[in-house]
Image: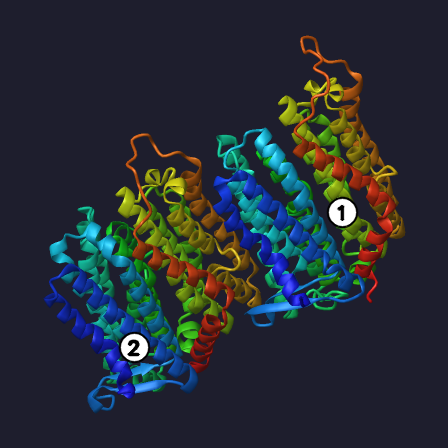
Amino acid sequence: MSEHLPILQIVVPMVSSLICILLRRRLLSWAFAFTVSAITLVMSATLLARVYAGGTIIYELGGWSPPWGIEYRIDILNAFVLLLVSIISTVVLLYAPSSVADEIPASRHHYFYSAYLLCLTGLLGVTITGDAFNLFVFLEISALSSYILISQGKDRRALMASYQYLVMGTLGATFIVIGIGLLYAVTGTLNMADISARLDEVGSNRTVLVAFAFLTVGMSLKLAMFPLYLWLPNAYCYAPSIVTAFLASTATKVSIYVFLRFVFTIFGRDFAFDTMHLDAILMPLALIGIFVGSLVAIFQTNIKRMLAYSSVAQIGYMMLGISFLSVTGLTGGIVHLFNHGVMKGALFLAVGCVVLRTGSANLDDFRGLGKRMPITMAAFVLAGVSLIGVPLTVGFVSKWYLVLAALEQGYWPVAVLILLASLLAVAYIWRIVEVAYFQEAPEDAPEVKEAPFLMQVGMWTLIVGTYYFGISTSMTVSVARKAAEMLMGASS
Amino acid sequence: MSDPTTIILAILLPTLAAPFFALLGKNPNLRDTATLSIGTVLFLVVLSLLPAVSGGGRPSVEIVQILPGVSLGFRVEPLGMLFALVASGLWIVTTVYGIGYMRGHHEENQTRFFVFFAIAISAALGVAFASNVLTLFIFYEVLTLSTYPLVTHHRSEDAKKAGRIYLGILVSTSVTFLLLAVVWTYHLTGTLEFTPGGILEGKASDNMIIVLLALFVFGTGKAAVMPFHRWLPAAMVAPTPVSALLHAVAVVKAGVFTVMKIVVYVFGIDFLGNSGLSVWLMYVAGATILISSLVAMTKDNLKARLAYSTISQLSYIVLGAALANNWGVIGGSMHIAMHAFGKITLFFCAGAILVATHKTDISDMAGIGRRMPVTMIAFLIGSLSVIGLPPMGGSWSKWYLALGAADAGQLALVAVLMISSLLNIAYLIPVVARAFFVPLPEGEEDTGIKEAPAFCVAPLCFTATGCVVLFFYADDLYRLVSGIVVQP
């Protein structure tokens, strides 16, 4: 049984998403989705432990050995991403019932949870598979189901946002499939390990270069790297609260994983950075993304949109870590992938509580919330200071490794820029603190009370994670470092 | 109780007690009694570490490894011991005063005040006991964040602006300069542990050392070295007990403590002293001393004048560190305690005047000595200590600092110290003179003696007495801090 864990990781949520449609009772479908997600969490934690101790796990689907069959290949990097996805999914589902009841008509709940599980399947599938075409299929599964999820937002603009994401996402996916097709043309295989081996023999010809270009641009669209992030703010802003929290913490992270996989494992570090000089584009774009995202965030009046722009900036940090092309830099990038997932999830869940009680996420609705929803606002501030990178939080750990990596490479100005950018985070977080704690609620504001118990539990779980992994970094950092060493070593 | 437990208890006690203060918020008497008892217990806990430390021991504890080779860890050495004693001792006094002031002045949200005050004390003790630069940095930032709600206590537009300056300067200096310096030091040496003799010698070129020292000093915005001093005058919108916390108990002291600790245990005074790489800092400190004294003379608002006086006095300590010789370090360290007692007395007096008469400007304080003789005599004693005249404690630290400057061959800085004393006289003594010798303005009746509530007056008498006591018992203090430069 346990040797089939890799396939169960995918099959369980996939089959469950179909079963979920049949569960027409509101709470039943929720409880079912939550249980399934919790099971995937246990499985991914087991997989990570196993990979950490015993090295890469290779699973051949249906006993067909590659390159004929599909292979699932789990190493320390994707095991870590699997864990992130399933943790966030489970916590978000724990938080979900009241929020979903508020934002989505009761008759559609089972469809909603079904799409959610399908999205989870897609994200896990993208991460776990060792087959390039299979990866594309799962990428589309997760993308299509996330279009559905986003369009469920209360505001009618959610439809537009979802459509926008659909256009951009499809563009990205098309680029990716073209890239994969070209690689298949050159190497005659779809298994990623095989492609990598054969690319070494082929060397760099024009087809490979074009494939690289298509894949890089396609993935950059998916992971919302500056300047290809335009789909992201609307999608995060108008989606239902829990969808925003789930996608913001996982979807872009999975895309970054795919980026790492293609650039480092398939094309190889030498090709991507020495031949193609990817870092020469990556580093400036990452830095510009950090500053543009943070600056735009300062001027947003909708907090969900503000956090979305903040995500653009944070993705910049991750890409910056990758662009250093050193073990420390990659460690910083990969650990930030996890850390940002946890803290941004916490922030979006806190905003979800506010949306539930006040009906919107506009800055004006935060007036006086410091007194009216003290627990939620405390959570928001605690997660917000992590985004700034105050010590004892996960944000600090990421920043530490990024600055250290910059210093190691002798990139002084970059180190200073990273630190200056965290001041911009102070600006956009403190704006909300001032409104919530220094302004009184308007006279005609509706009475609000604290969010329901389960929402609090979900939110505070991630807050505890934000501080736990900020103080005890041994798990996250050692896993990220192992992954970084693997990526740097595997391609040298 | 073993030493590690004691250290952890000292740091956690105020924070763990804070929620109980919040729960007791409905019953102010009970809440304030609880705060006072916790304060007393805390002081005793900190005091119990003293014998070991003065005996040459360095009690330490490691909690968890945060980064490879860097733990969240604590080690008590004489400088930290001194700061911890000052912070925990003055917490009790400030709490007593806070009770009188907050009630006498009818402040709102008193519970919140006591809660964040307690957390700030925890943070200050964390700074004091930190065994490496990262731990110190962590608690330094916690101290900034936990004092923000105190500085902005009134939630007014003014408070919000002051809060922005406070947080803006302290966070931006610490995040851009201090953190960069910390990461850089880690990159150069592979460790962040505070080590007698320093860790940087031979690891970097002279120019890099100068840049690093600048990053550390200016990154420690709490030390208020010009041009990063603006937050301190801005923060005077806060209630007076908060000003006492900022100026005497914890915040600025954490700043100069950090500078001193980093100079002694990261750079090493022999290294800095012999290489002369900190000479520029002596002049920056000297300039801050003179300029802020001059600015203080122009301020009519009593708290603003005291704030600039603090900026000036802090640079005495920074100067002591920059001198990088035994006298400088001893003088600077002693000045942490001496200035704390002197300045807290002055702020307590300013607050007492506000509570009793609602006056904030010095020009309105004519004849006030007749109404509040006790307060104004205490103010005189505090002033004399800040000026550095015997028989007040402040005279000793100035003496050693002057010795240090002479020892380093910096006669110009000896002159700076002397001129500064004259300037101190010029901006502090007129306040007392006006209070006693200028008659009450027309239209104000002589109401006889009308002091602030006893809870306000008792603490300021206590700290004023402390200024005198420290003069006579400076020997003990000297022996404690000399453990910083003379290794046991």
Residue underneath mark 2: A128
Q: Amino acid at mark 2?
A: Ile
Would residue A118 appear left or right of B110 to someone viewing this image? left
Q: Is residue A124 above or below residue B136?
A: below
In the foreground, A323 or B118? B118
* B56 with respect to A411 (left or right): right
Q: Position of residue B473 (x, y in %)?
A: 85, 48
Q: Is residue B360 something that shows in the picture?
A: no
Does the residue at mark 2 contact the one at mark 1 (Cβ under 8 Å)? no
Q: Nearer the viewer, residue A364 or B198?
A: A364
**Residue bearing the label numbered 1:** B337
Quarter of the picture holding the N terminus of chain B: bottom right
Q: The residue marked by circle 1 belongs to what chain?
A: B
Relative depth, front residue between A201 and A250 = A250
Q: Secondary structure at mark 1?
A: helix
Chain letter of disc 2? A
> Which amino acid type is marked by label 1?
Ala
Number of dots carrying numbers: 2
